Image: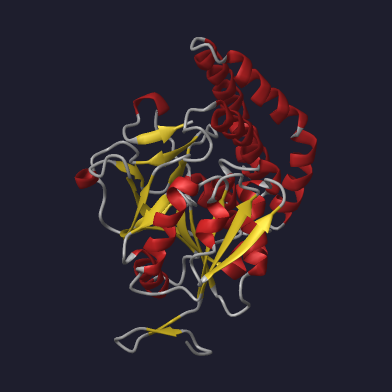
Amino acid sequence: MNKEGLRDSGQKFWPKITVVIVNWNGEQFLERCLTSLMDQTVKPQEIILIDNASSDGSLGIARRFPLVRLIALDQNTGFARGNNLAIKAASKESTWIALINSDAYAGPRWLESLLLAAESNPEFVAFGSKLVNEAERMQMDGAGDAYHMSGLVWRMAHGTPVSASAENEHEVFSPCAAAALYRRSAVREVGGFDEDYFCYVEDVDLGFRLRLAGYRSLYVPNSVAYHVGSGSTGGQHSDFALYHGHRNVVWTFVKDMPGILFWLLLPLHVLLNLVSIGWFALRGRGGLMLRAKRDALLGLSKMWCKRQQIQKTRIASIAEIWRQLDKRIITTKPGGKRL
């Protein structure tokens, strides 16, 4: 290690990078996650593990890895604040911040592939990995996040065969933060993750704000991570996941949809929310959905204040944002995990 970066056996210098893991009761996944980081072809400068007051054996596992810098919190602050704390605490020499969930396992070239993509594509500041379903290795978990003009978000290619997923690097609306790389200065410029979200959709919101600031995101299929998905929160369809996801979808639309697009697409967004309530009511979860939407409305005043600041500093044109929105019919869209 030197002041310029990290040097591998081939004498290539890599930029210094901090890997961040936000953990809450991830004992059953954490050792494998950390071991996969130790086996990277390009080693990170440091690994920061933010533990959100776990009550299991997570702390003991983290302490067995000398490279891990453990920050143990006395309460669960959520995924968004945990990442912000780690980004602030990271070495000042780290140009890049890589995020990986505690329930994800990195392939050996995960980090190297992200850094090579960043080196080859300096016009991009966020890079998403190819997420493979850990339980079913022939099935995709995600290939970047899409944002529909209605405000609905989903993970591209979710549930499709791995062999059918696109293998070329291409632009996406935003990377999934389960395994991603961000230019640290860009994330700090837009204010980091929104801590009011706690968790879910916070990565799409960050990606949207980066895009409004004139930045772009790239999907890197050579960077592979195997993802369990919602391993510590009761599963992807738990009450916890549905509540936060559907509340935060509203806040993201209100904060981030720029200018005339906000007013033109607002009726469609309202319709999306009404349909969501009806859909889940038919499945016995209407009360949960009503609570999510009620709390979203209660937070609108605060989100509108945030919107004013975000839109005041917007660089991207309305036309640029419009081009990046998915405009296809939602119900017929193949290969995507929707909320």
Which residue is rendered at x = 25% and y = 44% of the image? 137
Name the colour scheme. secondary structure
Indicate whether 18 appears above or below 16: above
| Between 181 and 107, the one nearer to me in the picture | 107
Q: Position of residue 112 (x, y in %)?
A: 36, 71
Residue 148 in view: yes
40 to the left or right of 237: left
Residue furthest left in the image: 163
50 to the left or right of 322: right
Which residue is rendered at x = 70% and y = 52% of the image? 310
Indicate whether 13 appears above or below 178: below
Q: Position of residue 149 (x, y in %)?
A: 51, 36
Q: Tell me the quarter of the picture where residue 109 sits.
A: bottom left
| Between 293 and 261, the one nearer to me in the picture | 293
280 to the left or right of 297: left
Report the number of discs.
Answer: 0
Q: Position of residue 98 (x, y in %)?
A: 49, 63
| Between 261 and 55, the one nearer to me in the picture | 55
Which residue is rendered at x = 56% and y = 41% of the image? 201
Residue 323 in view: no
| Between 136 and 259, the one nearer to me in the picture | 136
Indicate whether 214 appears above or below 94: above
Indicate whether 248 appears above or below 321: above
Q: Position of residue 212 (x, y in %)?
A: 60, 54
Which residue is rendered at x = 38% and y = 54% of the image? 105
